[in-house]
Image (spheres, rainbow, N blue to C red):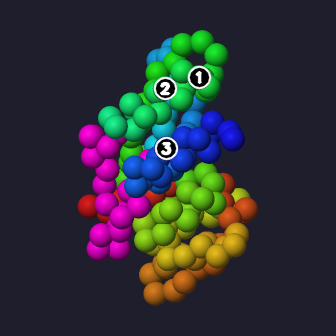
Amino acid sequence: MSLNSDIESIVKSVGLELYDAVIVNENDETIFRVSVLSSEIVDEKRKGISLDECVELTHLISPLLDVTPPVSGEYRLEVGSPGIERKLTTLAHFKKSVGDNLSLLLNEKEKIKGKLIKVEGNKLFLQKDDEIVEIDFNDVKKARTYFEW
């Protein structure tokens, strides 16, 4: 099994979903960032995750990383939510963001904002005003969720 699938198994064991596990460099520090989502849907939105859940996951994932480190050298483990406004880079990210407002930049430099209503295969379906727009995942250059205040 890979490190990512081992982490995903640990995350699932506490009733959460793995959103992403990435290595980032910030302020001359290497961070192994594990982002998780609640699997519970409340009023058509994902329930938030608590600090206690993040701490519990940190304690569960840390021993695994002692055996299989994600990078050579020093790093810091960070477990948290990907946030209410987050980048979407994989088809899996889109599937986990159904019901969220998205801002997309397409290959033709066209910008589209709308609510993601479903993902079927490689097709994304956004509710934009009074119409449903179908977009091929491969046409998306950048994507992120956004929150309307």
**Amino acid type of the residue that numbered disc 3 sits on in the rendered structure:** Ile
Q: Label 1 belongs to which residue?
A: 67
**Amino acid type of the residue that numbered disc 2 sits on in the rendered structure:** Pro
Looking at this view, is 148 or 109 the one in front? 148
Label 2 vs 3, first from the N-terminus: 3
Measured Cα–Cα span from mark 1 to mark 3: 15 Å
Helix, strand or loop at mark 3? helix
Query: Is 20 left or right of 86, judged from the image as shown?
Result: right
Indicate yes or no whether the magenta region holds residue 5: no
Q: Which mark is residue 63?
A: 2
Residue at image coords 59%, 41%:
6
Q: Residues within 10 Å of mark 3 (few under 14, many from 20)?
A: some
**Amino acid type of the residue that numbered disc 1 sits on in the rendered structure:** Val
Q: Is residue 12 visible?
A: yes
Q: Which mark is residue 10?
A: 3
If the image is split into quadrants, where does the C terminus sit?
A: bottom left
Q: Pointers 2 and 1 in contact (CB under 8 A)?
A: yes
Q: Position of residue 54 (x, y in %)?
A: 34, 39
Helix, strand or loop at mark 1? helix
